[in-house]
Image (spheres, coloured by chain):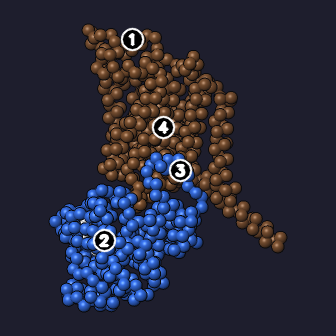
Amino acid sequence: MTYRTASIVAYVVFFAVVLALPLVLNSFWTNRVAIYLVYSICAIGISMSWGYAGILSLGQGLFFGMGSYMLAMSLTLAVPENNPVPQLMLLNMEPDAVRDLCCVTTGSFLWIPFRSITVGMIAGIVVPCILAAAIGYVMFKRRTTGVYVSIITLAFALIGQLLIINNQPLTGGFNGLANLALLNIGGFEFDPYGPSAYYTVALTLLAVILLARYMLSGRIGQILKAIREDEARARYLGYDVENYKLFIFCVSAGVAGLAGMLFTLTSEFATPSLMATSLSISMVIWAATGGRASLLGACIGALIVNFVGSLASESATFQPVWPIILGLLFVFVVLFMPNGIAGIFKALVERSGKAERFAEAELSAREA
Amino acid sequence: MNALHRPSQSAALASAAPILRTQNLTVRFDEFPAVRDVDLSIADGELRVIIGANGAGKSTLLDLLCGKTLPSEGEIWLHDRNITGIGEAAIARSGVGRKFQTPTVFKDMTVLENLQVASNRRVRVFQNLFDRVKSGPSDKEIAVAERTGLLGSMKRKASELSHGQLQWLELAMVLSQDPKIILLDEPAAGMTSAETDKTAELLLDLAGQHTVLVIEHDMAFVRRICRTITVMHQGSVLAEGTAEEIERNPAVIEAYLGSATLSHA
Ligand SMILES: Nc1ncnc2c1ncn2[C@@H]1O[C@H](COP(=O)(O)OP(=O)(O)O)[C@@H](O)[C@H]1O
Ligand SMILES: [Mg+2]
């Protein structure tokens, strides 16, 4: 079996399992796994920018969080008692303020477009993309590379988190947005604990991974890989390296934003801790464990790490040390399995392929 | 072979309009002028050799021409376009190809993939977004691989190649780019004598179709491929002329006194 066939088989098996799971899971686990699949989408975003183009963003949580907030704002306004003005603003407004979204608190007019769910859903992807474009433009035009990109993105995520926490009257502050309506599209309600939300996530994951694979297995994937290998050489061949980096950075942010919206859909809240450094770093660990240069690998890495993590959180002994285990896992992966689970899979397939060819050659030699 | 080309071509080229021109090209690193006041004029289709001792500023001159280093003063013109400071990628697109002294290729990619990235002339992001890559080499890629002796190694990773082969691969990539002018920094460095011979032949073959600017140390090699030589010394152009003229030039002899570069030539 060639590696290509083997990876197609891996994709088919993975999606068969993912699509079949709700048949055997109770509603609690359906919701849990749906959230893990959301994390898988994040890991795909990381794999696209880090695995393919060598851009290690430690601020992916910023885009994830923004996506989550955009949909959560629309779902907040969809709750009847949050009209005309959300409760969180009533609690924080000046006593004599006009009770209207235009001016109840500073900046509250920003909420107005989110009365439309469609705007919320579009903003969930577009806003992270625009944010990434702005950050990326500054970084890449100045030819920031390597660890500096990681530090700058990390800093921006921290700034984002602080801005949200410190603007409680506008954002709900530390508590985030928790009083949300269920997403309702054309009269169909998405139940976070039922198959509807699960399949929304699973099918989005399927679409994202297939589109990403189609794109990255083509010309642009090859060029990004070349940029990762030697960006100066790519420039001397005529490629505007900055534009390529900006592009993949924005796509990766858009994917994270999409995942953020699905997070709101499945977990029914948005919180500033989505932008915490620890979550951004966890995303990198998921992708590294699964194999950063493999989209499916990154996706499986997110599932496995989160599943094991949730088992650990139920045990009194493992729960407090889980962050340490996660850190050690990262060190182990970086040192001993740089291509993660996908790398091991590839090595096994190639070895068995060699053994097969060897056996065949032996057989034909004996027959002759 | 060289006797055949030399006289007629240099005469013809002298009158041709220059493809590449520099004016007062100067760069200083912390006040130290690595290249100063270089006025270069390269004719279309010319094969020009730059020689000079270590540290004379030859590589830095090529860095200026391909945009790697920004000049402190002076201008670079390609045909009638001022390409000073427009950026490496734009300079490359306008037709300048650069081969470095230590080969720079995409190590983790196969020879074929390296050539594919180089020969793709639609370089914008959105032109490549949904563009597929052929699994086999195109005719153009086969031709350039054949010319550089890499045809048998197309499926090998660049990291598995020998040093000489890496030099060839980088050269093949630059050729795939289809540049108007090719800048080569010591293309024969680290090559065996058989490989060096082949390089010399290739350069002669290239001249005419392309304009070639080549830095070389080895005078035997220089004499084989040469038309016009530019001698650099301490950042400036010391002399320009044919091999015989250069070797008789007293200033050059003085600058090279005790240096092995000319004496073993
Ligand atoms: N980036 C740089 N910063 C400081 N000095 C440099 C730099 N690049 C080259 N130089 C200096 O410029 C001089 C010319 O170097 P170079 O062009 O590499 O010489 P050549 O290729 O002729 O041997 C040397 O003295 C070198 O030390
Ligand atoms: Mg040099």
Q: Are marks 2 and 3 on the same chain?
A: yes
**Residue A348 image point, x, y percent:** 64, 56
The dot on residue A62 is none
Residue B4 as seen in the image, left or right of residue B229: right
State the image quarter where residue A69 is shown.
top left
* Quarter in which the C terminus of chain A is drawn: bottom right
| Mark 2 Cα shell of 10 Å, populated few (<14), some (14-19), many (≥20) | few
**SS class of the residue under badge 2?**
loop
Residue located beneath label 2 in the image = B17
Q: Colour of chain B?
A: blue
- Tell me the amino acid under the disc marked 4: Val
**Residue B247 image point, x, y percent:** 27, 89
Q: Are marks 3 and 4 on the same chain?
A: no
* Mark pair 1, 4: CA separation: 32 Å
User: Observer-nearest residue: B86 or A15?
Assistant: B86
Chain in brown colour: A
- Tell me the amino acid under the disc marked 2: Ala
The single residue placed furthest to the left in the displayed view is: B31
Image marks 4 and 2: residues in contact by CB distance under 8 Å: no
**Residue B228 image point, x, y percent:** 31, 81
